[in-house]
Image (tube, rainbow, N blue to C red):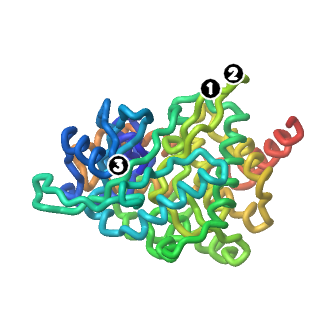
Amino acid sequence: MSAEGRFSAAVGCHGRALHVHEAVMAEKHTKPNFNQPQVAELVKRLFKLTPAEIRSLPSYDDQNFYVAVAEGGEYVLKIMNSEDSKNGSMIEVQTYAMTFLHQNGLPAQTALPTTSGKLMSLEEMDCGYGSQKYLVRLLTYLPGTTISKSPLSPQLLYETGKTAARMDLILQKMEHPHMGVLQRENFIWSLSCLTLLERYIHVLDGDPLQEVVNSVLHQYKTSVVPQWTSFRKCINHGDFNDLNILVQPDENDGYKISGILDFGDMNCGYYIHELAITIMYMMTEHPNPIEVGGPVLAGWESVLPLNKAEKDCLYLLVLSRFCQSLVLARYSVTLHPENAEYLMISSKRGIFIFRQLWELGKEQVEKVWFESAVQFDDRK
């Protein structure tokens, strides 16, 4: 999860339930509960730094703290929940990926090594549930605000698509002894695993939305899966959404991308998946959602032009990501009924966009996306 914490940012801070981490299904006692003196002690002991300011950052299943140090510098101390902390190899690969992107010119966080030279430390603490172990990392603090708070100009959407493609191309060159952990065969947020939604579809019983979701699932099986062999494989960030991209004002009265957050959904997938995910989340923030696809696509293809099969499946894969997001948001309501009214109000826009995409149909949406992508390139 990002420094701000994906679930609380998506639901609590920004009033949306369009992205719900699979950790909503985890037990509450796995979340760490460190206090500020304990955080100060960790920073001093593990990194030999003197905290000048510590403040809590929102998070759902981890604990995040902003830390400014007397020696100069701003950081995010990230304390993973005890369940995710058991998978040290996965966190190690994710942390390495961030550093690898940074070394190759993209604005990702990097982890500060501990005094023993490691990028993370497994710390044992009793947070009120008995003694448990939590992985601790000190990450660089990236400047900027989330793209969700910025006007999505065509140019910024273009840069977002371009950055997503560059990111996946760089990740494809990454080597690490534990790369095998990214083969996440039953990962609920992977677009390769869309049919896993069938076990949650009952949460839509009695809702007309269920019929649309079932239709998308059917078309995914009949139209997308047979074309997998033509998709180009890569490593996906897997969650290039509007809360995981930071931006800053640029010199042309626009915005530039200043940070890429949250590598928790990294998985072995396909380039076209990253593009579909990026388009879907940018749509949720735009006043005219259908117009988003063109500039994002133009940016993506400036780095990595799509092949015929990828182009043919883009529309359905964007719909598929909406299905994952909306069904799992609804499922989270069954786990947290106390938030039901709030969650449902905040997901209305996502449902509206999903229906609009479906009702316009593949041919009309593709016409808008692909024609505007060409026009955007012609203007550049």
Residue 137, placed above or below residue 309: above
Check disc 2 and give the amino acid type.
Answer: Asp
User: Which residue in the structure is indicated by mark 2?
Assistant: 253
Quarter-of-image position of residue 198: bottom left
Dot label at residue 249: 1
Going from the N terminus, do you reach mark 3 or mark 2 first?
3
The image position of residue 242, as x and y in percent, is 53, 41
Instruction: Identify which residue is drawn at 69% across, 54% down.
Output: 165
Dot label at residue 370: none
User: Which residue in the structure is indicated by mark 3?
Assistant: 47
Instruction: Identify which residue is drawn at 39% across, 40% down.
Output: 9
Residue 354 visible, this orientation: no
Tell me, yes or no, whether the two marked residues, 1 and 2, touch with CB atoms within 8 Å: yes
Residue 371 visible, this orientation: yes
Quarter-of-image position of residue 70: top left
The image position of residue 172, as x and y in percent, is 65, 66
Q: Which element type, helix, strand or loop, lies under badge 1?
A: strand
Choose between 183 and 212: the one closer to the eye. 183
The image position of residue 313, as x and y in percent, is 69, 63
